[in-house]
Image (cartoon, grey):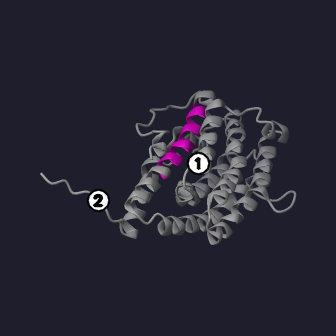
Amino acid sequence: MTVQVKSGPWEREVFLAKLRAIGVSRYHDKHPFHRYMNSGQLTPDQLRGWVANRFYYQKNIPIKDAAIISNCPIREVRRLWLHRVSDHDGISEGEGGIEAWLKLADAVGLTHAELLNEVHVLPGVRFAVDAYVDFARTKPWPLAIASSLTELFAPDLMQERLRAFEQFYTWIAPEGLEYFRSRIVQARVDSDQGLNLTMHYCDTYQMQEAALRALAFKCDVLWAMLDAMFLAYGEGIEYAGRQLAYITVAHES
């Protein structure tokens, strides 16, 4: 019997469909902790736990993006990617996504010192985020960019999250929600950019397969963070688990 081995790359639409299918099955919007949050069922303490731990991810995003830039030998790509660092770090004091998240911390009753000193960061969250940064530092830069394509699914999630916070968590001051408002627009711009780069530079079947694994890995990072928060703060939340959660899958090649 002759075995047919795939050698050529998928067409763009086929590759895109496979990337989107990963989001449908593995994106963290389906996690029970997230579903409870977006349906207004978290207590103030549970929400504060999420804000504090998610900040560890937020503050590592520009470090991840700087690693991608440092690994990329193509000047044009570095130019395209550079704004992501300043988007989170800000150009001046008081600007950027990290500062916006600190305003969310103010609004939910956390201090800046609690977040900046990582007082509430759970071991599982730290492990997952550090694994993501390590991936960006050690893997080929096109795969690190492909891992960022969770942004494809972020705008809808941000819109749902903003509606939920405004409807259910009215004790949070509106100015604390600016990060969510800004990401609804920015995530679409970023995802288009990341997708175009992935399509261009993941141009072999092997690289496309690796890009799918990279995106699945990133989804598992986000899911593992919520698993850790569920274990710490999830009293009253029903959780059936998820069968697909292979945190090491992206390190196989």
Query: Along the horizontal axis of the image, is 123 left or right of 227?
Result: right
- In terms of image quadrants, where is residue 209? bottom left
- Residue in the image at 54% along x and 54% along y: 147
| Distance from the alpha carbon under mark 2 to that under mark 1 | 27 Å
Q: Position of residue 179 (x, y in %)?
A: 72, 56
- Amino acid identity at mark 2: Lys
Q: Which mark is residue 138?
A: 1
Magenta residues, start to end: 215-230
Amino acid at dot 1: Thr
SS label for mark 1: helix
How many C-alpha atoms fall within 10 Å of the one at disc 1: few (<14), some, or many (≥20)? few
Total numbered labels: 2
State the residue lying farthest toward the right.
93
Q: Determine which residue is flagged by label 2.
A: 6
Where is residue 182? Give x, y as percent. Answer: 70, 62
Q: Is residue 221 magenta?
A: yes
